[in-house]
Every structure is written in C-alpha cells, then in structure tokens.
Image (tube, rainbow, N blue to C red):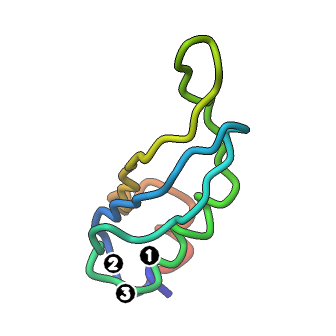
Amino acid sequence: MAIRLGHEGTTILAFRIGVDGLLTDIRVAQSSGHQELDDAAVAGARCWHYRPAMKDGKPIEVPWQASVKWQLRGGNSWLDRLFQ
C-alpha cells in the first residue's frame, strides 16, 4: 500500500542491544510520517542482530538508535513497473 501511495520517509528507531546482540524495547523515536512504514521498521528490527558492546572484556547492554530510510526508486525497479 505504501508503494501505491508513494510514501517515503525516514523512521528512527530507539532500542537496547542486549549482551546477546539481540534488540529489546524497540520503539519509534521519530516517525516517518506514515504508520505503515514505522510498523514495518519495527517489525524488521526484531530480526536484527548486533555485535554486543564490550566493557572490561565483557558484553554489556547499551541503548542505541538506527534510521530506516524508505525511498521509492524512479521507475527502474520491477515494483515501480508493477504498480504503474
């Protein structure tokens, strides 16, 4: 639906990286302006895995942020041709 409507933007996510590298407490820190894009960013981030931060040789939990940029291509991709 977002493609058909031409929605673009950047979703900024805030979360914690655990000692195992998995994300917890994922939330939208700044919306793209489109709920479906923000929801997709959160859903995708649930699959991310980071190398944990280290302190004194031991993994530690840390807060972090990441941006997900949603940008449509200008008519070159198969999705663009499909929805024309």
Mark 2 touches mark 1? (CB < 8 Å): yes
Q: Residue at x 40, y 55 (%)?
A: 68
Q: Earlier in the sequence, mark 1 or mark 3?
A: 3
Q: Which mark is residue 51?
A: none
How busy is the neighbourhood of tag 1: few (under 14 within 10 Å), some, or many (20 plus)? many
Could you say where residue 2 lies in the image, as x and y percent from the top left?
44, 82
Q: In 3D space, how far apart are the residues under numbered discs 1 and 3 (Cα atoms)? A: 12 Å
Relative depth, front residue between 82 and 14: 14
Q: Which mark is residue 7?
A: 2
Disc 1: which residue:
37
- Which element type, helix, strand or loop, lies under badge 3? helix
Residue 82 higher or lower than 57, as above or below: below
Q: Identify the image quadrant of residue 37.
A: bottom left
Q: Is residue 41 left or right of residue 57?
A: left
The mark closer to the camera, 2 or 1, is: 1
Q: Residue at x 48, y 41 (%)?
A: 62
- Which element type, helix, strand or loop, lies under badge 1? helix
Q: Earlier in the sequence, mark 2 or mark 1?
A: 2
Q: Is residue 5 left or right of residue 83?
A: left
Q: Residue at x 63, y 44 (%)?
A: 18
Could you say where residue 50 lies in the image, as x and y percent from the top left?
61, 36
Quarter of the image for the C terminus: give it.
bottom left
Disc 3: which residue:
5
Mark 3 touches mark 2? (CB < 8 Å): yes
The amino acid beneath tag 1 is Leu
The amino acid beneath tag 3 is Leu
Q: In 3D space, how far apart are the residues under numbered discs 3 and 2 (Cα atoms)? A: 6 Å
Q: Identify the image quadrant of residue 12.
A: bottom left
Q: Is residue 46 left or right of residue 34?
A: right
Could you say where residue 80 lies in the image, as x and y percent from the top left?
47, 68
